[in-house]
Amino acid sequence: MTAIDLSDRPNRWWRSRAVQRFMRHRLALLGMVMIVALTLACFLGPYLLPYDSLYIDLRARFAPPLTGQHYLGTDPLGRDIAARLLEAGQISLQVGFYAMILSTLIGTLIGVIAGYRGGLVSAVLMRIVDAFLAFPSIFLMLALAALLKPSPVMITVIIAITSWMEVARIVDAEVRSLREREFVLAGRMLGLSSTHIMFREVLPNVLGPIIVAATLTVARAILLEAYISFLGYGIQPPLPSWGNMLNGAQQYLDKAPWLAIIPGLTITIAVTSFNFIGDGLRDALDVRNDQN
């Protein structure tokens, strides 16, 4: 048996080709910087502001941005928009991240089992996926949000159970292409269990597509939370989210347009940044680029 030469492996993970390709992707780097800055601002910024999100200054109602210490202005009740925006960002970003984690876990589990088992198991699981995809997810999500008590945890779960199907399809396709490869056949010959092969041998080889899908799922989850909160079925006041801030601003568009522009712009920045990161990861993890 020929010994495997490990001398050509990079000594550090950041020297890998995938990381090098990602670092050359300018939009992905811009997205990463924007997400890090937005996250730090949302979780650290409230401690640096002179007002909290519930402080009411009736004398400063509808104050425009850059008025005194109200850096982004105030809302109809005189509450500081900057404080509410950052606290809303904490909720919206956490909903996006936790919904991504939950939906990715569900989709990965179903996709790995369906792709590796094949046959009747795959047929049943994929028909379940098709059934979820055939039903308009936004109507299912609104129905669940209307029936259940809206809270950040519940909204996260609702978004997750309506967002896992794409991940399941991606993982299923990738596992199908790997299940007859030499390392899988070797594992079977060695008597390894199917569970061991699925989750210890096959799954690590499909992490690239899963990571890309997970990144894009965060952006989708943030948009969905904003959508259902804008319609009044999501996060409920006085707890702020970017979506219900837009809901409260719609009747004041002619009088105080900044009430809608500021949270709307923040949502756009967050979603666009995650999409940039997803595009960069997709290009960086594409093995076909190694042949170029």
Image (cartoon, helix red, strand yellow):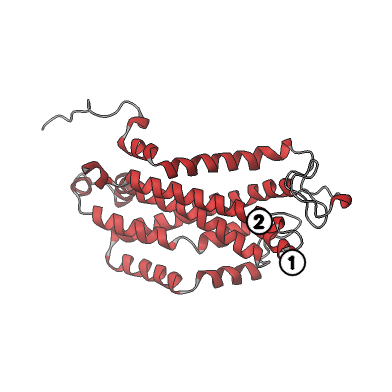
Q: Quadrant of residue 240?
A: bottom right
**In the image, 196: left or right of 225?**
left
Q: Give the numbered dot on residue 251.
A: 1
x and y percent of residue 140 in the render?
55, 71
Q: CA distance from mark 1 to mark 2?
A: 13 Å
The x and y percentages for residue 225 are 60, 59
Instruction: Judge whether 16 appears above or below 153 on screen.
Output: above
Q: The N terminus appears in which quarter of the rendering?
A: top left
Amino acid at circle 1: Gln
Q: Which residue is mark 2?
A: 261
User: Is 46 placed left or right of 274 in the picture?
Assistant: right
- Residue 84 in sight from this viewpoint: yes
**Mark 2 residue crowding within 10 angstroms, few (<14) / some (14–19) / many (20+):** some
Residue 102 visible here:
no
Which of the pair 226/292 is nearer the observer?
292
Residue at image point 61% right, 53% down: 265
Residue lying furthest right: 59
Viewer-proximal residue among 75 and 286: 75
Mark 1 or mark 2: whose residue is earlier in sequence = 1
Q: Nearer the viewer, residue 123 or 233?
A: 233
Kind of residue at disc 2: Ile
Residue 191 as seen in the image, left or right of residue 253: left
Residue 136 is tagged as none
Query: In which quarter of the view is residue 156 placed?
Result: bottom right
Q: Give x and y (percent) for residue 273.
A: 50, 48
Residue located at (68% from left, 64% from top): 149
- Asked if the residue under mark 2 is in contact with the one under mark 1, i.e. CB atoms within 8 Å, the reply is no
Image quadrant for the C terminus? Answer: top left
The part of the image, by quadrant, that contains residue 70 is top right
- In the rendering, at what x and y percent does residue 261 appear? 66, 56
